[in-house]
Amino acid sequence: MEKAEPDNLDPALTAITSDPAIESAIDSHSVWKTLQAENEKSTSLSINLSEEQISYSLKRRKLKSKRIEKEKLPPPGPQDSYDFKPIGEIKILKESTEDFNGKETDLKICRLKLIKELSDSSLEGLEGFNYIWLIAFNESDDSQEESKAENPSEPQKCGNLQLILCKLISIKGKELTMSSPDLTENTPILDIKPYHYKDAIDLPISP
């Protein structure tokens, strides 16, 4: 069935829209509008990409700047301080003259009681040794103008750590009784090591 044309359609308008030139112009306008819309989308996408590229470029510049500044910094040095927890303190019982490492020496008979946080088995294995090493912490004497490492028995030290050789007298539970010429009252002890015969040096040289 053919579609009926509206009765009230203006004949002049019908004639114009039926003109091939007019139809071509209308089609061209539609194509132009479509292209314009696509162009606007493309422009918007291009703007977004440009913003992302700028942001990425700024991030790279910041990272490069940080790397350059880091390279200018001096290499990190040793820490200014370290935390140590003593395992006990020295208590002097008496002073006497006894044999120490084959020589008659003025000794201090001392006791070291381990802190309660350490287990009762902390000293197991020391019973068979007659000499032990104590790693002690001594405050440096600021009044000393010169401090050297050459004599470990001198009161002035070049550092706060001291390695003390002690003659082990007895072990009872968490208490050690020992003697040494270098022990002082209330000296904090950081660690205990057995003196093994393998540590002995044949023909050592000393000034």
Image (cartoon, rainbow, N blue to C red):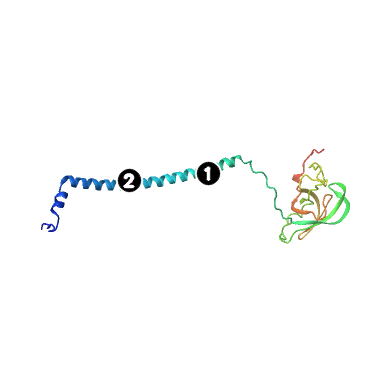
Dot 2 or dot 1, earlier in sequence:
2
Report the residue at 14% width, 51% height from top: 12
Q: Which mark is residue 62?
A: 1
Q: CB atoms at circles 2 and 1 under 8 Å apart?
A: no
Q: Is mark 1 on a helix, strand or loop?
A: helix
**SS category of the residue bearing label 2:** helix
Residue 111: which disc?
A: none
Given residues 89 and 2, the one toward you in this image is 2
Q: Is residue 84 left or right of residue 36?
A: right
**Residue 110 spot, x, y in % from top left:** 83, 55
Splitting the image into 4 quarters, where does residue 70 fall? Answer: top right
2 or 1: mark nearer the eye: 2
Q: Position of residue 151 (x, y in %)?
A: 81, 43
Residue appearing at x 25%, y 46% in the figure: 31
Q: Where, quadrant-wise, is the C terminus in this rendering?
A: top right
The residue at which mark 2 appears reads as: 39
**Residue 24 pos. (x, y %):** 19, 45
> Is 146 drawn above or below residue 8 in the view shown?
above
Residue at (31% x, 47% y) in the render: 38
Q: In this view, does 73 lie to the left or right of 96?
A: left
* Tag 1: amino acid: Lys
In-image side of 94 versus 25 (left or right): right
Location of residue 174 (image quadrant): bottom right
| Residue farthest toward the left in the current orientation of the protein | 1
